Each structure stands twice: as C-alpha cells, then as structure tokens.
C-alpha cells in the first residue's frame, strides 16, 4: 500500500484549506461578521443540491458557482431583511440560513433514492465517512481536485487582499470615511462576501459545513489577541491556521478519526492558550498586572504614610514596623509582606524596629501626592 | 380490519409526533422571545452545536440512550459553551460574533471526534445519536414527549416566576443593576432556560435547525405587538402552530418533518412582516401613501390660501 503518499497529500490539503480560510476570516472577525460564514456555509446547501441535479457530478465547476451564488444571495437576503427595519441583524441571519438549509434538506430527501448525494457528506463533509472512504476520496479521485480548488482559492484571496489592501483596511475600520472618499464600500463588501462564499464552498468539501467556521473564525480570532497591526494579523492567522491543521492532522492519525474534528479541537485549544499567555492582553498578563498593581499601591501607601509623619513628634510610633498594620488598617501578614517588598525595592530602610524613608521612597511619595 | 389497524397506528404515531412538536414550539417560541429581544438570536445556534460533545460524553460514560441523560449531557456542554462565550467577550476585545463562531464550530468538531470514536467502537446501541445533528422528528416516542413536556414546563414556570426580573434585564439592564438585581445571576438563569429549550428539541429538529425554532416564532410575534406578555404568548402560539402544521404537512407527502416545521415558521414570519398592522410592510406603504396624499392636500391648501391672501393684498394696495 502507499499510505505515506496519501498522508502527505491529505496534510497538504488540510494546510492549503486552512490558509485559504484564514485570510478572509481576518476581515470577518474585524467587521463583526463572523456568523455570516456560518450562515453561508449552511445556506449554500440548496445551491449545491440544485447544481448537482443539473450536472450529476459533485466536482463540476458549476456546483461551486451555484453554491457561491447561493451564498451571496444569503448575504443579500439578510441585508434586505435588515433594511425593512422590522428585524435586527442577528435575527435576520438566524431566520435566513435555517430556511434555506431546510429547503436543501427537503430537496435531498426527495431524491436520495436515485442519486449519490449523501446527507452526511453534504452536512459534515468527509467527516462522517470511515477512514477508508476518506482515503479513497482524498487520495485517488478527490485529493488532487481539492488541492487545486483550495490552492486556487488561497491565491485568489491573497490577490484580492493585496490588490485592495488599502480599500479593505479603510472600509473595515472606517466605512463612512471610505464612502466619502469614494471607495465604494458596498463593492468591497460584496467582493469580500463573494470570496467568503467561494472559500466556504471549496472548504465545505474537505471539512464540512460547520468546521469551515472553525477554520475561518479560529485563526483570525487568535491572531486578533496577539497584534494591533492588520498586516501582522493576516500573516499570523495564516500561520496559526497552518499550525492548527498540522497538529490536528497529527492527532487524527493515531486516534484514527476524520481529521477535521481534531483540527477544530486544536483550533479551540490554541485559542485558549493564546487567551491565557498572550503578553499584555492574556489572562495571565491581566492577573499579573492586577497583583503587581496591588503591591505597588500598598507600597505607595506605606511611603506616603511615612512621609506624612516624618519629622513630627509621633513619627517614632507611626514608623514602628510591628504597629504599621494598625495605622494602615492592613492585615498583619499583609503588612509584613508589603514592608518586605518595600525594603527590597529600597523605598525604605530599616533602623532597629523602625522604618525610615530612603531618598527613592520620598521621591515616590512626593510624586504621588503631587499627582 | 387490517387497514383500520394501520390507520390507527399511523394516527397514533402522528399524534405523538404532533404533540411533541407542538410542545417544543411552545417552549422555544416563548423563551426565544428573550433571545431575540436581547439580540442574541444566534445563541440558540451556538448552544445547539456546542451540546454535541456533551451528548457524546454522556453516552460514553453511561452507555445508555435514555433521553434524560443525553439531554443532561447536552445541557452541561451547551451551558459551558455559553459561559465561555460570556467570558471571552468580557475579558478580551473579541466581539460576540467571533466568540459565537469559535465556540460553535470547535465544540461541534470535538463532538464529531467523540462521535466517530463511538461509532468505531462498534457499540450496537449507538445508532440514533446522529439524530442530535440532523433531527429525526418521526422517531419521537411517548417518553420523548414526556421529557419535552416536563422539562419545558419547568423552564416556562421558572420564566413566569422571574417574569419581572427578566423583563427588566432585557429592557433596561442598567436600571435593573441600580435597584440591586443580581444581573450576572439573571443572565446565567436566562441562558440556562434557553439551554433547556434547545436541548429538549435537539433530537426532534436537530442542532442545525433548532436555532430557527427559537428565532422565527419570536420575530413573527414581534411584528404584531409591542408588549412583552403578548409577544411571549403569541410566540408560543406561533411556535406550536408551526410544529403542528409542519408535522401534518410533512407526514402524508413524506418529506422530513424538522425542515418542514422550520419552513412553516419562516412562512409565518413572512406573513407577519408583510401584513402585520402598524409595523408590517403593507401597512407601512399604505400609511406612507396616505401621508403623501394628505401632505399634497395640505400643500395645495397652503398654496391656495397664499394665493387668496396675495390677491387680497393686491386688491388692498390697488384700492388704496
């Protein structure tokens, strides 16, 4: 058998699919339209089914065209519903795609007996298939096609973003300025939505309709935690998408499960990791900052306290280490630790049982009071 | 006689399915009202997908397909997903839509991994777990209807008990906080009620279509009234109507029940948006035309009046 060749092909398809999805995902996340990809990935079903009836082939370009058109139609439907002002955006999405999806399911159910369009395959891509089926699909008749389709999608997305980078940036961050400058935000918007539809349709075949959303939203959301620059976010999200795909694939092989599942799982774990450890914005960074602020504040309180009573008759009593906690109304253990920190930082110096301000401590206290 | 036997059997099944769908529609219609009014319509979509790993884990742990156990697993996973979304939005600059998409797809993906592991283990009992993805209304049994009725009833009673608090939460959260209501606890309570409404419907309509059961009746009801109590009542009625009509339409022509229910609910939304008094499109266009006409008459009168006045002024100047 030739499992090694097949493995490399499958891995390559996963990587290319992840990269192609990660690019438009950045703009969806920034424009708060991530759920549009979810809506599109469900709503393209009737388009795929109708095109399948016409062509009787799952790989024909007409299928991709019809599905893409249905995707764009979904976006238009949602916007028309919103424009009536009777329905809010979230509800408009929540109404449109289940209805289109239902039509697709009904269409499939009517003709399942005489065509080979499996419900499971359409909903979940190859995921529901046993590993043998998947290999046959990917390796022999399918793998190369998917690779070409997704490779083409990646290049198309990349070209669109490179050519319209300035316009996309402006429309994303300041749509009204873009409109006044004559950049036609609607045109850019529909261009982007067409690409999202096409990418979704292409990836649909490899990973199924729901996991497409993980490929689109996951890397972009993770990258959004890490950087403030659009260019860096684009590059990062492609890298993260590829890492997710490779790690997911490597996990899928020993457990012998369809690869899209582990990729989605890894996507969540990588996001969670970034959520924890990212500098400045991560949970750990936030917690450390809180702790740091707490000690800083306590030390500042201490030096101000000492400054207030410096040179006065009661100074002796007020700067007694053993009694500090009473004057500052702290827990004794807390007070001891604050004193230790302050001594380490050379804000204060210890003379017998009393604390004396150092030059540094006095400056800090005075500065804080002036502010 | 055989024919009769078949007929009664058929009717019995149909009756069970219809009553299940009606109950489901009532519960999800009433509770969906809150999701729609809070602009979290897609929370249903997220919870229904995020519930999948819970179902798989519940099955893996117990090896049984008792509806109550699977529903419990689904509820825990869906609830966890909703909580993760709340904390992502609270602690990062990531907005609701991205958090929704992330949790929805990755939880679902993890659920798919577990499901395929279960399927590979060759457990003879596993058939039917797929129903939670696609929905299989035709397989609703009497015990499922009981589960839906009891859990849904509990959720509705809790909703009625906290009626005032929930109303304040959705319409004026700031005021609710200022008079000392525990906002976060109420938020979690509302999310939990939604989780219940969703997970009891998963097996009937499936994860993908459950979100529409939450959104469509509420949006339809919104067009007819501006009052919360009427809206909840109407949404419950619309939901039940969609359940019943979808089941009855789909049964003789043999099309899947879940999608038919959704299409019925969507049709109700279409009718409501078009014809509802005061808000509907038809009403609005009539009102607009009437306004335009009365404006025309008014301007006509104004022009006429100005002309008369001018003429009189002219006469006055001529006379003097």
Image: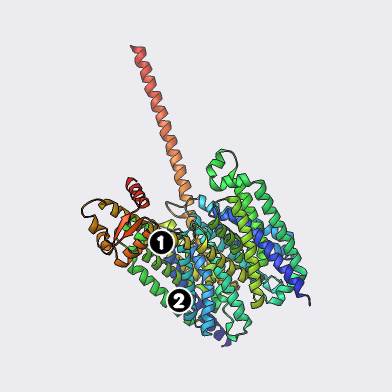
Please identify the quadrant where the C terminus of chain B is shown: top left
Q: How is the image coloured?
A: rainbow
Residue at the image position 72 percent from the left and 59 percent from the top:
A151
Q: Is residue B25 above or below residue A255?
A: above
Task: Check disc 1 and report the residue beneath it.
Answer: A291
Q: A367 or A98: nearer the eye?
A: A367
Q: Quadrant of the N terminus of chain B?
A: bottom right
Is the residue marked by circle 2 packed among few (<14), some (14-19), or many (20+) residues within 10 Å? many
Q: Residue furthest top?
A: B320
Which type of secondary structure does the marked residue at label 1 adopt? helix
Q: Chain of mark 1?
A: A
Q: Are marks 1 and 2 in contact (CB under 8 Å)?
A: no
Residue A298 locus on image (x, y percent):
34, 58
Tag 2 secondary structure = helix
Query: Which residue is denoted by mark 2 in the rendering?
Result: B148
Residue B58's spot in the image, x, y percent? 51, 80
What residue occupies the far left of the structure in this picture? Answer: A313
């Amino acid at each position: 058998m030739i499992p090694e060749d097949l493995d490399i092909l499958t891995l390559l398809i996963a990587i290319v699919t992840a990269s192609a999805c990660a690019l438009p995902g950045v703009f969806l996340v920034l424009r708060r339209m991530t759920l549009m990809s979810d809506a599109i990935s469900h709503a393209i079903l009737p388009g795929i089914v109708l095109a399948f009836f016409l062509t009787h082939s799952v790989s024909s370009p007409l299928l991709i065209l019809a599905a893409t058109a249905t995707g764009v139609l979904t976006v238009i439907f949602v916007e028309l519903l919103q424009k009536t002002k009777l329905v809010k955006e979230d509800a408009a999405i929540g109404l449109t795609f289940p209805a289109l999806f239902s039509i697709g399911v009904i269409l499939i159910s009517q003709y399942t007996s005489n065509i080979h369009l499996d419900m499971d395959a359409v909903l979940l891509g190859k995921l529901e298939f046993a590993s043998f089926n998947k290999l046959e699909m990917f390796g022999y008749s399918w793998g190369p096609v998917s690779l070409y389709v997704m490779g083409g999608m990646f290049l198309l997305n990349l070209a669109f973003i490179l050519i319209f980078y300035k316009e996309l940036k402006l429309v994303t961050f300041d749509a009204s300025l873009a409109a006044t400058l004559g950049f036609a935000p609607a045109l850019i918007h529909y261009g982007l939505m067409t690409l999202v539809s096409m990418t979704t349709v292409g990836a649909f075949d490899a990973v199924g309709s729901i996991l497409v959303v993980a490929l689109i939203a996951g890397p972009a959301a993770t990258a959004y935690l890490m950087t403030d620059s659009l260019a860096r976010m684009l590059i990062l999200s492609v890298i993260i998408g590829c890492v997710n795909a490779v790690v997911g694939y490597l996990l899928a092989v020993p457990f012998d499960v369809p690869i899209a599942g582990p990729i989605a799982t890894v996507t969540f774990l990588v996001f969670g990791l970034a959520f924890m450890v990212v500098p400045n914005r991560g949970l750990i960074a936030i917690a450390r900052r809180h702790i740091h602020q707490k000690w800083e504040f306590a030390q500042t309180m201490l030096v101000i306290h000492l400054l207030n009573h410096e040179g006065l008759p009661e100074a002796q009593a007020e700067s007694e280490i053993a009694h500090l906690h009473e004057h500052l109304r702290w827990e004794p253990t807390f007070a001891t630790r604050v004193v230790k920190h302050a001594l380490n930082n050379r804000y204060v110096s210890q003379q017998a049982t009393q604390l004396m301000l150092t030059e540094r401590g006095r400056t800090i206290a005075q500065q804080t009071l002036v502010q | 006689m055989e024919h009769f036997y078949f007929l009664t059997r058929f009717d019995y099944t149909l009756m069970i399915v219809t009553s299940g769908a009606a109950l489901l529609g009532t519960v999800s219609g009433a509770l969906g009202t809150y999701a729609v009014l809070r602009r979290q319509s897609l929370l249903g979509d997220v919870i229904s997908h995020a519930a999948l790993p819970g179902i798989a884990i519940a099955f893996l742990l117990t090896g049984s397909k008792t509806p109550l156990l699977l529903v419990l697993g689904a509820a825990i996973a869906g609830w966890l997903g909703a909580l993760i979304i709340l904390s992502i939005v609270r602690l990062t600059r990531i907005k609701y839509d991205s958090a929704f998409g992330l949790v929805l797809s990755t939880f679902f993906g993890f659920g798919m991994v577990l499901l395929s592991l279960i399927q590979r283990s060759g457990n003879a009992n596993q058939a039917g777990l797929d129903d939670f993805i696609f929905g299989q209304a035709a397989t609703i049994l009497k015990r499922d209807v009981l589960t839906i009725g009891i859990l849904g009833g509990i959720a509705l009673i809790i909703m009625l008990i906290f009626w005032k608090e929930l109303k304040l939460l959705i319409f004026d959260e700031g005021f609710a906080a200022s008079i000392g209501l525990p906002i976060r606890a109420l938020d979690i309570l509302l999310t939990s009620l939604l989780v219940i409404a969703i997970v009891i419907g998963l097996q009937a309509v499936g994860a993908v279509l459950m979100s529409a059961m939450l959104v469509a009746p509420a949006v339809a009801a919104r067009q007819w009234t501006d009052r919360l109590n009427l809206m909840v009542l109407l949404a419950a009625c619309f939901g039940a109507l969609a359940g019943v009509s979808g089941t009855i339409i789909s049964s003789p022509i043999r099309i899947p029940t879940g999608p038919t229910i959704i299409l019925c609910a969507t049709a109700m939304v279409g009718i409501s948006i078009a014809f509802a008094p005061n808000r509907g499109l038809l009403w609005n266009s009539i009102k607009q035309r009437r306004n335009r006409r009365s404006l025309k008459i008014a301007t006509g009168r104004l022009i006429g009046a100005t002309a008369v006045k001018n003429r009189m002024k002219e006469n006055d100047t001529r006379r003097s």
